[in-house]
Image: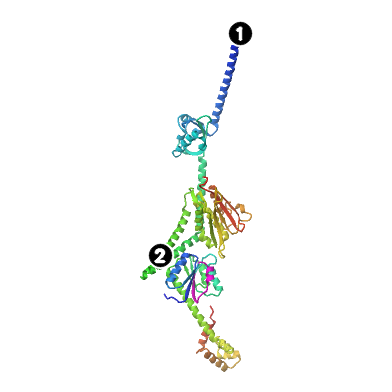
């Protein structure tokens, strides 16, 4: 199993035995772990590093796991979450998955089940981080375009032919062809499909 | 006639009159005595209560028809022939001889009323309530007997019904707690499975990381013991069959109740807080039944306080020994309080404020507490909610 540097696994479970076991398992594969006995305690200390995931018990006194999940979502945190529960009923699983849980595992679970789920969650965090970087780069490039070039680009990406763009903007086909060449040059692209991919990457929202 | 002769004659006549008057008085006294004897004999025979007169050596001098009926022995076969303790069952006989002798040495030193068991001539056992008094100026005593066999049987039956009801109610209560109890057992299982897997991985790796394996296996042992303790608590509560009274520590009963309800309370957003006085808190009781009453009161409190989403609130269970006579368990909740307008009905059977309640919990609780010579009452908590107080006679002080 590979360990991811600078990653952190948050564990929130009100049972001390379960917390101890999860910590032991995760630390044994080199993952840094922070454990909390309640949702509020976790939120008080929550300062997420770029790469982290959350192992969350559903049934806890005070704010329960699903409520914590919803709270994080409202705060705009996209932390990959593995739900663990002692009583997996279908409606609860559905609710958790809808709220963005990556995995839903039932207590008691085998060691490998937990380790796989946590590893998947960290990979997902990593991918999210990568796509964040990708999006930032795409947006930076698109920002170089002039307002007129942007107008032309948007129509091109919508799938309008050069003639259609010219008609829409009330200019000559030649002028649009020149704009199009200039846009691809500025963005260091070779083709229209590449332009479409770049715009999609910039638009990507979670 | 010579004057002397006349004088002598008068003197004799007077003497005769005196003697005749004395004889009349004697006859009168004898008649009164006979009447009195007949009166007392009639009372003795017809009072309806089995009665005997007992000599110093224990022999029954006189036995009435009631006694014959009670024991199946004719008075003729008893009077002057049998001793009173011969009628008593073996297990009680020594005690009765003890009373008999001590009563003649120092009448105040033994109870003048007591209970014992006899055997009817047909072999059937009889429970007797005996009242004994010394006859003034004699070494004899008079004893009367009340047959309380039926009453005792009825009491035993009603105790048995209460016990059966309590057993059923305990099963019902655990049924209602099943989800929490399953959760409570699942947690240690989760720890055990995870740590056992980890230990296996360490052992199979051949890396010889003994310290980590030991730590994981210690956790397996700890969690297994935790699960075993949970199961033991449930079994003790469920499979309790005896209804014997023995000295029990009320503080311990409260702790057992808290242990069984902890998970349920947590799931409902309630924190259990116990305050147990260090002073005397022993009562003579069927411990599991009392624990059941305490749990019932606590569950009512927990349910009325339920608020899983908020910060947990405290349900306080206090054990206080208020005076030298009673141990008090006081359960203070911050829930919805006693039902307005119906507060006096909460201990009635089939009265419930819960949609799915049978209304048997508190009424059974009151029956159990009263059968233990105790008292249960409910009042409003001035801070909101209810306070239920259960008082039981302290054991070992005056008894």
The answer to whether residue A150 is left or right of residue A112 is right
Name the residue beneath numbered marker 1: B6
Q: Where is residue B158 in the image (x, y as percent from the top left)?
A: 52, 46
Image coordinates for residue B98, horizontal then vertical, percent: 46, 36
In the image, residue B16 lies at what x, y percent?
58, 14
Residue at 61% in and 91% down: A170
In the rendered image, which quarter is residue B319 located in? bottom right
Q: In this view, does B208 lie above or below B396?
A: below
Residue span colored magenta = A37-55
Taking B161 as reference, is B118 above or below it? above
Sequence-wise first label, 1 or 2: 1
Which of the labelled discs sits on residue B217, or is there none?
A: 2
Please name the colour scheme applied to the rendered image. rainbow
- Vertical order, A187 against B256 (above or below): below
Is B318 situated above or below B120? below
Please indicate, yes or no, whether residue B131 appears anywhere in the rendered image: no
Regarding residue A6, the answer to whether it shows in the image is yes
What percent of the width, then of the height, locates residue B255? 50, 56
Confirm or deny contact between disc 1 and disc 2 (CB under 8 A): no
Pick whichever, A8 or A80, lies toward us.
Answer: A8
Q: Distance between the residues labelled 1 and 2?
A: 134 Å
Mark 1 — on which chain does it sit? B
């Amino acid at each position: 199993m590979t360990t991811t540097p600078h990653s952190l696994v948050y564990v929130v479970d009100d049972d001390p035995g379960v917390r101890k076991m999860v910590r032991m398992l995760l630390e044994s594969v080199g993952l840094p772990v922070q454990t909390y006995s309640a949702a509020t305690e976790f939120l008080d200390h929550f300062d997420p590093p770029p790469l982290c995931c959350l192992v969350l018990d559903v049934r806890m006194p005070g704010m329960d796991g699903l409520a914590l999940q919803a709270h994080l979502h409202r705060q705009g945190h996209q932390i990959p979450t593995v739900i663990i529960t002692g009583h997996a009923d279908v409606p609860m699983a559905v609710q958790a998955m809808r709220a963005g849980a990556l995995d839903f595992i039932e207590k008691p679970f085998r060691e490998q089940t937990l380790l796989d789920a946590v590893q998947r969650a960290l990979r997902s965090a990593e991918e999210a981080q990568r796509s964040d970087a990708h999006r930032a780069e795409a947006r930076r490039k698109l920002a170089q375009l002039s307002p007129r070039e942007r107008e032309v680009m948007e129509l091109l990406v919508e799938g309008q032919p050069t003639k259609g763009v010219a008609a829409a903007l009330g200019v000559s086909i030649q002028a649009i062809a020149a704009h199009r060449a200039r846009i691809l040059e500025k963005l260091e692209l070779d083709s229209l499909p590449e332009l479409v991919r770049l715009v999609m990457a910039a638009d990507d929202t979670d | 006639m010579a004057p002397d002769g006349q004088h002598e004659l008068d003197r004799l006549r007077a003497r005769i009159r005196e003697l005749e008057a004395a004889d009349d008085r004697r006859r009168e006294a004898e008649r009164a005595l006979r009447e009195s004897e007949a009166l007392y004999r009639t009372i003795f025979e017809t009072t309806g209560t089995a009665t005997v007169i007992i000599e110093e050596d224990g022999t029954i001098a006189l036995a009435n028809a009631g006694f014959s009926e009670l024991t199946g022995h004719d008075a003729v076969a008893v009077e002057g022939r049998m001793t009173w303790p011969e009628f008593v069952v073996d297990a009680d006989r020594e005690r009765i001889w003890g009373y008999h002798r001590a009563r003649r040495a120092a009448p105040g030193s033994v109870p003048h009323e007591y209970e014992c068991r006899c055997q009817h001539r047909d072999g059937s056992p009889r429970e007797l309530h005996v009242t004994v008094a010394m006859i003034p100026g004699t070494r004899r005593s008079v004893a009367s007997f009340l047959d309380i066999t039926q009453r005792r049987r009825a009491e035993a039956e009603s105790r048995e019904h209460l016990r059966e009801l309590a057993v059923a109610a305990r099963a019902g209560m655990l049924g209602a707690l099943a989800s929490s109890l399953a959760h409570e057992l699942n947690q240690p299982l989760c720890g055990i499975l995870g740590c056992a897997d980890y230990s296996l991985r360490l052992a199979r790796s051949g890396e010889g990381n003994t310290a980590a394996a030991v730590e994981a296996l210690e956790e397996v042992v700890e969690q297994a013991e935790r699960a075993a303790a949970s199961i033991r608590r449930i079994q003790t509560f469920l499979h309790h069959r005896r209804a014997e009274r023995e000295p029990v520590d009320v503080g311990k009963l409260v702790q057992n109740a808290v242990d069984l309800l902890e998970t349920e309370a947590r799931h409902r957003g309630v924190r259990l807080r116990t305050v147990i006085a260090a002073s005397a808190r022993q009562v003579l009781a069927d411990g599991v039944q009392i624990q059941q009453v305490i749990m019932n009161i606590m569950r009512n409190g927990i349910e009325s306080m339920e608020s899983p989403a908020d910060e947990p609130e405290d349900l306080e269970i206090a054990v206080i020994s208020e005076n030298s006579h009673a141990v008090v368990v006081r359960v203070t909740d911050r829930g919805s309080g006693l039902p307005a307008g119906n507060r006096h009905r909460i201990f009635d059977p089939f009265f419930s404020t819960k949609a799915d309640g049978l209304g048997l919990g508190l009424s059974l609780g009151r029956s159990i507490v009263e059968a233990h010579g105790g008292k249960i009452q409910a009042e409003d908590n001035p801070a909101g909610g209810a306070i239920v107080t259960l008082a039981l006679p302290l054991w070992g002080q005056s008894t």
